[in-house]
Image (spheres, rainbow, N blue to C red):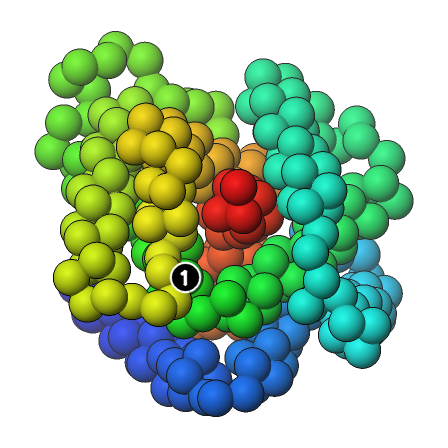
Amino acid sequence: MARIIEMLKQRIITALVLLAILLPAVFFHKVEAFAGVALVLISAATWEWARLNQSASIPAVLWGGACAVACIGAWAGGLVHASVPLLWISSGGGWVIMSAWLLRSGVASWNRVPRALRLVGGLCALWTAWLAVVQARIIGINFLFSVLFLVWAADVFAYFAGRAFGGRLFANKLAPSISPGKTWEGVIGGAVGVIVVALVWRNADVTFSMHDVSLYSRLAQVGTVFMLLALLFLTMMSVVGDLAESLFKRSAGVKDSSGLLPGHGGVLDRVDALLPVLPLAMMLGSL
């Protein structure tokens, strides 16, 4: 019991520290503040990624530095303000194809992928996520939070639905060899939760005449059916991101991506579901 209390205390303290850093950066009138905080987190995640793929200490730091340089280069080159639909499509498509292969082939398949390809692919995915989240902030705070809350709602509703109904509707679990705790009931609960959040958020956009509309309102402008299908797709991809990182960690034989965030594991453990969702949300939100 004492250990559980101590772990909970660590989680709360870490969460409060992160919020104390992230929220002022998000609401600061210049986007550079948020871009800088996001750059630090993504670079740390790249360092974790290199370590998960058997990089020694110094090379792992260099991979993190390479990601930081790539992010700074994108900023200096004006890419954060550019329209890059092909990047979102190729990144999102890459996530769909890679994840389908990984989840079908299992944990052992990952180590058969050349290590250099794993490292470069991870760096590209993390850099793309940084660019997507910064562009989301440039669009507006409401838009950014609507994307983040989609992933958080999917995770929270999936957890409670899985605890309440897991194993009652479907005999088979979602991916028992990768993440034994995840159930189909949880996925369905997460999708329902996301749709509820989207409907409430869209109504709030209209009620308060938000100039900076949310992702949900942008999707609804195309059509209600399109919005629902897009939300189901994004919810599934958030689950895929979580499962993919679990597979990577199982392949590396570790529980957490690092210990950078006491009580929470590593940065990758916190942003895994966002990695595929961010570029896909940018793609769908621009239609």
Q: How many marks?
A: 1
Q: Measured along the vertical axis of the image, is residue 137 above or below residue 89? A: below
Q: Measured along the vertical axis of the image, is residue 185 above or below residue 222? A: above
Q: Amino acid at mark 1?
A: Phe
Q: Residue at x 60, y 29 (%)?
A: 96
Residue 216 location in percent, x, y?
A: 34, 48
Foreground pick, 106 / 272: 272
Q: What residue did someone put label 1 on? A: 143
Residue 160 location in percent, x, y?
A: 17, 42
Q: Quadrant of residue 13?
A: bottom left
Q: Residue at x 68, y 46 (%)?
A: 85
For the question of whether residue 40 can be seen, the reply is yes
Q: Quadrant of residue 144?
A: bottom left
In the shown orientation, is residue 139 left or right of residue 15? right
Instruction: Looking at this view, name the residue that lies furthest to the left.
Output: 164
Foreground pick, 10 / 211: 211
Disc 1 on helix, strand or loop?
A: helix
